[in-house]
Amino acid sequence: MWSTLAALIVLCAIIGFWRDSLHTRELAIQVCRRTCASYQVQLLDDTVALASLWPILERGRLALRRVYLFDYSLSSLDRRTGSLTMTNRRIDSVYLETAPEWE
């Protein structure tokens, strides 16, 4: 009985983590779209990739910090990489490689 209950709790935790990850990834894609639009660059593949995930303590509570990578182009001929760092669903930073035209 206890092993069944423990397995059910673990399964619920995994499903909850999976759903949270999907929602956070969708938010990351929206942020990257808006960032690319504001800098007038093209978000390539219209997606982000999870580069790292680690637990941190923030104000005494457990939080997940995720770093997403995305590709963008200035002229459709080049490919540059940007990154987005999020803690839970809060945006910490967005980074775009410096382009010569921007300097």
Image (cartoon, rainbow, N blue to C red):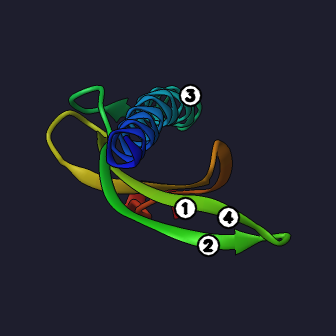
- Mark whose residue sits in front, 4 or 1: 4
- Does residue 27 appear to the left or right of 81 in the view shown? right
The amino acid on which the numbered mark 4 sits, given as a three-letter code, is Leu
Q: Mark 4 sits on what residue?
A: 62
Q: Is residue 75 left or right of residue 84?
A: left
Q: Secondary structure at mark 2?
A: strand
Label 2 packing within 10 angstroms: few (<14), some (14-19), many (20+): few
Residue for badge 2? 56
Local secondary structure at mark 1? strand
Per the rendering, the mark at residue 65 is 1
The local crowd at label 3, few if under 14, some if 14 to 19, many if 20 or more residues have their Cα within 10 Å, is few
Tell me which label, 3 or 1, sits earlier in the chain: 3
Q: Are marks 4 and 2 in contact (CB under 8 Å)?
A: yes
Residue nearest the observer in this picture, 27 or 74: 27
Amino acid type of the residue that numbered disc 1 sits on in the rendered structure: Arg
Q: Quadrant of residue 89?
A: top right
Disc 4 from disc 1: Cα separation = 10 Å
Q: CA distance from mark 3 to mark 1?
A: 21 Å
Label 3 SS: helix
Viewer-side residue, 78 vs 64: 64
Which mark is nearer the camera, 2 or 3? 2
Of circles 1 and 2, the one toward us is 2
Q: Closer to us: mark 3 or mark 1?
A: 1
Q: How many marks?
A: 4
Identity, as a three-letter code, of the amino acid under mark 2: Ile
Q: Is residue 90 left or right of residue 15?
A: right
First in sequence: mark 3 or mark 4? 3
Residues at marks 1 and 2, CA–CA distance in whole angstroms? 7 Å
Q: Which residue is mark 3?
A: 34
- Mark closer to the chain start, 4 or 2: 2
